[in-house]
Amino acid sequence: MIASQTATFPQGAVAVLTIDNPPVNGIGSGVRVALGKALEEAIANPMIKGIVLTGSGSFFSCGADIREFNTPKSRQEPSLRAIIEQLENSPKPTVAAIHGAALGGGLELALGCHYRIAQAKSSFGLPEVKLGILPGAGGTQRLPRLIGIGPALEMVAGGDSIDASQAQSLGLIERLVQTDLVSQACELALEASIRTEGLPRLSRAPIGATADSKVFDEARKLAGRRYRGCIAPLECIACVEKTLTFDLDEGLAFERERFQFLVNGDQSKAQRHLFFAERAAMKPPKVEAELTPIRKVGIVGAGTMGTGIAMSIANAGISVVMIERDQAGLDHGWEVIKGNYASSLSRGKLSDSDVKARLALISRSLDYAALADVDLVIEAAFEDMGVKKEIFSRLDAVCKPDTILASNTSRLDINDLAASTSRPSKVIGTHFFSPANVMRLLEVVQGTRTATDVIGSLFAFARKLGKIPVLVGVCDGFVGNRMVSPYTREAHFLLEEGATPEQVDSALRRFGMAMGPLQMGDMAGLDISWAARKRMAPTRPAHIRYSKVADTICELGRLGQKTGAGFYRYESGSRTPISDPAIDVLIAECAREAGVERREITDVEIIQRTMYALVNEGARILQEGIAQRASDIDVIYVAGYGFPAFRGGPMFYADTVGLAEVLATIERFHDRHGELWAPAPLLKELVENGRSFADL
Ligand code: 3H9
């Protein structure tokens, strides 16, 4: 795990210690033991004048091995803190030679070294905050002593990486090198070994210009917006703040105590769960056949979804051709795209040449013949099976035989669509989320006849786009929207039973949801779910409870933000929901007609009714094989539906509450509210066997 070599130069010998723990040189217990020993030997060896620490493979080191947290291995001596002390207290110069990335504990190791040099393409970061923890091996104390409070605060509490030139200008690294990283590090160590002044140790460095408290207040405000509901950013800020009043030892003790508090808490367990859940979801299926390289994509429909998808493809440097029925539609889509890029330009997110390059990748046509040479078509037309089938048969006729035909439907039957073509194995669903150029989630919908290489090709394509692809099966609404139905159903029932829209939404926002379900409906447009309900009306059993609240609101022409009114009303040009007494009257009237007795509704009931509706449906989805893993559902909800990351997703949340308790509450709801609350058989089975979703 540590390769130890001696590099000999005319001026003397240097020990080169290489962390070799693929794929990311995570610092697990094995690495710590081996590194501690190698350091001890190098320090004791009279022939060695200096020590260089580096990494094999693609990275210097990406930090502690997260899988070991909360296990006995994390307590295995020596600790990362002890190794960093060993490096810092070494009487011989220690140099970190950094390539690829130095992240988290990897950067903390480098901060323990007396000097740091790096290759031009390397990056540096303390991303612990994104895992619900803080840099617990001195990062919050040493980094401010090296680069100053402000920049350190940004790195520690924001979690984003910086590149090598930024690192150099902040003084994080001494030198940037193009080649011969390790030999240049050795030379630096040897130069330092003959200097008479003491070695630079960050533990002894004074804290530079003191920051006034406003910097910390600002950081807390920013963290509140960026990481709403998360406690880790606040703990990160508190640790950095301590550098103003504590000496290093006191600061390290404080940092250590707060790290332990976070690492043992539910929030960080949830965020670490999501880290691995995302990676599991993004693994493509095993494919025997060759994948289709996707170099050019056709988009049918230049509406909100079509334009967003076109932009996300162009952003990845891939050519797109957009097709519309008429020139006005095509022009409108083009204006939307140009407007979005202009806004990125004015906000400094993109340069003028970036914008030009991306626009140049998007061509437009009214003629399907323009799709003759594309490798993939994504249909993003009106959500109507008749319309989509017609488009698919035209695509089938005009596209190359191996072109993949995808539909961006959010709920329609991919199998039905596939059957209308001569190439069902090449038909797949790609459910993007709006705005498609921003949202990272992509539900990849596998039809019964979709070929695995088509799925594999889509996964590779999604990764190029920077998306998180999650494989789902065919059913109404797939995973995400299918679960939204019972979630919003309960929100509407709660209105009839006595809650107001603001009460429902604010309870869920306090729980951590980015937005409440009624506010979300207004934003998305109430007509979309209204159309789905109308479609299902003929088959809806009459004896099952049904709320007419949303339908009645739509019948008044209140379709959400776009019409200035929905569950709330909106001032012209504003997206801020304002309570509307007319809606309270409408709800009371619907409740009276439905014979629902109104009562006091608590926040606890709002959370349980909506969350357990998600969980119960999620369990059915799992049992039916529509989702492959409980953790995939969590990824979908966090990445696509504003579910709080610090709760890990609905299925992880249910495990945290305890499935026995969740089931008992669902059974109570079943007794009180009837068959819509029948517990999912999988949930019952798990409780009977004392298992959790995580055990599946
Ligand atoms: C820390 O350092 C705490 C200290 O402050 C204090 C301690 C006292 N541990 O993402 P990829 C796995 S906290 C364990 O697909 P990429 C990952 O699951 C740590 N495993 O590759 C995957 O496994 P599999 C602070 C890890 O090239 C495989 O490696 N550091 C870790 O797209 C490849 O990963 C971080 O938060 C880990 N630390 O991206 C950095 N990291 O093949 C977290 C990765 O079985 N890591 N794995 O699915 C990352 O951000 C990305 O992995 C990275 C590479 C950018 C490094």
Image: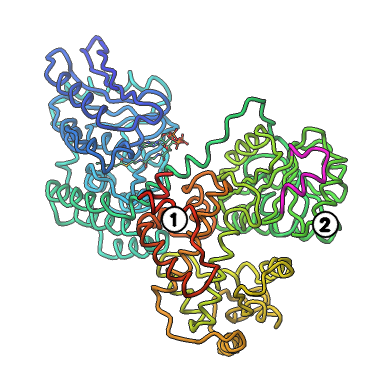
Q: Horizontal placement of 599 versus 550: left or right?
A: left
Which amino acid does the dot numbered 2 rest on? Gly
Q: Which residue is mark 1?
A: 684
Decide which of tag 2 and tag 1 comes sooner along the chain: 2
Q: 11 above or below 133?
A: above
Question: Percent from the top left, x then y, of residue 102?
Answer: 35, 35
Distance (Cα) linking label 2 and label 1: 40 Å
Which amino acid does the dot numbered 1 rest on? Lys
Q: Horizontal placement of 91 versus 641: left or right?
A: left
Ligand 1 shows up in the quarter that is top left
Query: From the image, which quarter does the C terminus lie in?
Result: top left
User: Would you identify the image quadrant in which residue 238 lies?
Assistant: bottom left
Q: Nearer the viewer, residue 601 or 676?
A: 676
For image coordinates 71% across by 39% down, the residue present is 449
For image coordinates 22% across by 22% down, the residue present is 51
Residue extent of the magenta highlight: 413-426
Q: Horizontal placement of 303 versus 458: left or right?
A: right
One can see residue 200 in this view: no
Q: Is residue 379 located in the magenta-colored stretch of the structure?
A: no
Q: Secondary structure at mark 2?
A: helix
For image coordinates 19% across by 32% down, the residue present is 83
Q: Which mark is residue 386?
A: 2
Q: Secondary structure at mark 1?
A: helix
Q: Nearer the viewer, residue 74 or 613?
A: 613
Q: 268 above or below 89?
A: below
Q: Nearer the viewer, residue 291 or 170?
A: 291
For image coordinates 61% across by 28% down, the residue present is 287
Question: Percent from the top left, x then y, of residue 283?
Answer: 53, 36
Q: Which mark is residue 352?
A: none
